[in-house]
Amino acid sequence: MQSLPLGFRMTGLRCGIKPAADKLDLTLIVADEDATAAGVYTQNLVYAAPVAIDRERTPSRRARAVVVNSGNANACTGQRGLDDARRMAQVTAEAIGVEAEQVLVMSTGVIGQFLPMDKIEAGVRNAASQLGHTGEDFVLAARGICTTDKSHKIATREFQLAGRTVRIAGMAKGAGMIGPRMATMLAVIMTDARLEPIDAQYALSEAVNESFNCISVDGHMSTNDTVLLLASGAAMDEPLPSSEGFVFFRELRELCVELAKQIPDDGEGASHLMCIHVRGCISDADARRIAQTVAESPLVKTAVAGNDPNWGRIVSAAGYAGVSFDPDRLELRLNGTLLYRDGAPQPFDDPAVSRSMRESRETRIELNLHLGGAEANFWASDLTHEYVRINADYRT
Amino acid sequence: MQSLPLGFRMTGLRCGIKPAADKLDLTLIVADEDATAAGVYTQNLVYAAPVAIDRERTPSRRARAVVVNSGNANACTGQRGLDDARRMAQVTAEAIGVEAEQVLVMSTGVIGQFLPMDKIEAGVRNAASQLGHTGEDFVLAARGICTTDKSHKIATREFQLAGRTVRIAGMAKGAGMIGPRMATMLAVIMTDARLEPIDAQYALSEAVNESFNCISVDGHMSTNDTVLLLASGAAMDEPLPSSEGFVFFRELRELCVELAKQIPDDGEGASHLMCIHVRGCISDADARRIAQTVAESPLVKTAVAGNDPNWGRIVSAAGYAGVSFDPDRLELRLNGTLLYRDGAPQPFDDPAVSRSMRESRETRIELNLHLGGAEANFWASDLTHEYVRINADYRT
């Protein structure tokens, strides 16, 4: 692993929200000095209490901490949930000696239950005494935000910018999109670049749009989805000049894509990561819409789970995406093999394509509309027996 | 069963398209005289050859027959598919002594394979010699259009109109939305009311909008979806006066709802029929959009399969439907029990609600936005292991 961004300390630990004794469920990330913070949040009308708090507090130029609990989403909990989220920030602020408004909050897990505030308060105080800046501390923090994830999700970057070495490090969690079987998409990204709040917000929003907004496990939008960017500025004295902004943005976007892809790859029950690339479109929005429609079709997802090069399902999903195109110009490749062109099936070695699906974790679906120069990528889980088992089993 | 509409003869038989020796795969319905015909078709850009043919031929005042094959969708088959569909109409016309343009065609089953025209031609000739107008003939016809359906789907109505007894009889098939595991939504509705083509088309379009357009098995729009209405006029001498049109429309709509609900009830792997009723909306379109979003959420569908009164998934699905509402005014009932109101969970007997789900085929999900007077119904299958098994198993 590359070295972590300067100016942050962190840890993850168990405070007892989750039943399983070996699961971490609280993460604390602290910036040594005032940091720039930007946030991107769920677009669900029904959003959780911590989302309401963070929306008020970003963008900011004086953020000092992010406190995260897993195992309880603090969603659909009304005024008491809002009070609890504010209290979580307040307790964190007291433990590290900053103001409550400088603390951001995230929660993920069961919907509709109140936070066990005694456990969380004790956990926050413990965490504040265990902060560190090694790779081990980073991994503990990444583990503390997980729910049904099979493994923690991290990515790092190190590059030259304005004559300085700059670092970005991110952690994410995924699984299904929402609880009570405990999930939600959360990510925290840290950098030691010095960024103006408006630049940080713009860069984060754009990067999320091409990464975390282009993934799907089950298409169900969570009440808690949050991506935060914290910029300590510890790597440089002056804010990043605009001329260098694009380099930073490109690195941030690549890191976001790397993190985002890990979510459907570790989606509930997933046996394949579907990598969908749609090009030849009139607009990026058209390309995205087709890619997402293919990604979310249960028939495409079950076909991929069954290693079935079932091109009819893919072509027909594109056809109902709501984007205008000429079916006779549509071209489809699966794992590189041409399956459909000129409005008619193309002869192909069916068992060989099926074998290529069985032998690879990634299934590449490429559609070309041959209409224009716009394109989009989308990443999704397939749909397996295991997904149904995880989500249909009664909670008790 | 009530008596069938006057003026039609029909049958269903096996011509050998499907591998299983006990499955019917060809249906022929013939009107004794020129009939009014209306059609409603898939909105998929990628549509099958028979849809292209029928779109040219409806509405009409001189339709004479509908010929249907199951086991092969004749979709994504290019020019040869169009030629085959026209040939299917031509052979039917010759067998019953009418013009080819008076014959409508439907196909359902595997995508991307050419029709076995020798089998179909022989089947059509056989069918033309076996037509009848009894309940048994009606059931044979309803069986001939099925694919993975566990049972055939029929509904009938008989009522007084303009001083005459009028009948409507319909058949439908469903299962998953699309092949190669063979499916698609098809329906044929017959009546002996006398209707002008424009009235028939209007009544059918409206009725479909509140029935067949409000169901979902897996949300994947087929290349072949078709609903046809044939009106023989045999029950009356003059076209139906406008003043009586509403009575006919109401009966047609109820019959369509009765038929349509049978499709998700018999959806691939379904263990529950989800009946979703959304009211208190500003517009019917808003209500429909929320109902459909809830119906298509894999997390809601798996929760219902698991008899889990998981209100968080339902409330959050409503929240991402793209309709503006106040979450604090949202009210949710499941099988009649209040679960969510005033932005907070309501205390309820969780095991009792779960038991009510386990003991009933239908799960009633009622949402009230408390904003206006508009409402909508939607019917959907739940999502089970069996759905994944049916759709993930490799075709060979």
Image (tube, coloured by chain):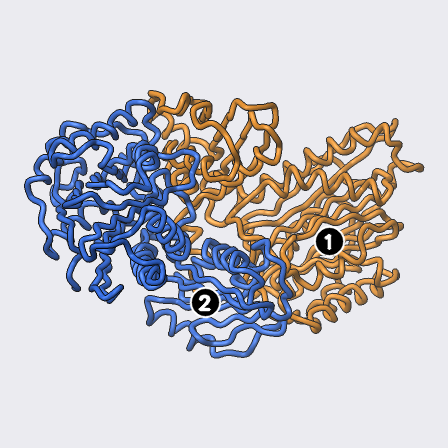
Chain colours: A orange, B blue
Residue A215: where, in percent of width, then height? 57, 42
Which residue lies most toward the left here?
B129
Vertical order, B281 against A162 (above or below): below
Q: Secondary structure at mark 2?
A: strand
- Nearer the observer: mark 1 or 2; the answer is 2
The crowding category of the residue bearing disc 2, from other C-alpha atoms within 10 Å (few below 14, some 14 to 19, many at least 20), is: many
The residue located at (59%, 59%) in the rendering is B319
Residue A110 spot, x, y in % from top left: 58, 64
Label 1: which residue? A11
**Amino acid type, label 2:** Ile
Q: CA distance from mark 1 to mark 2?
A: 43 Å
Please say whether residue B272 is visible from this viewpoint.
Answer: no
Residue A360 lies, with reference to residue A174, above or below; the image says above
Q: Quadrant of residue A261?
A: top right
- The residue tagged 2 is B365
Q: Where residue B76 appears, x then y in whole percent?
A: 35, 29
Relative horizontal placement of residue B88, taking residue B350 as reference (left or right): left
Instruction: Name the one closer to the observer, A273 or B120.
Output: B120
Rendering coords of residue A347 (x, y %): 33, 20
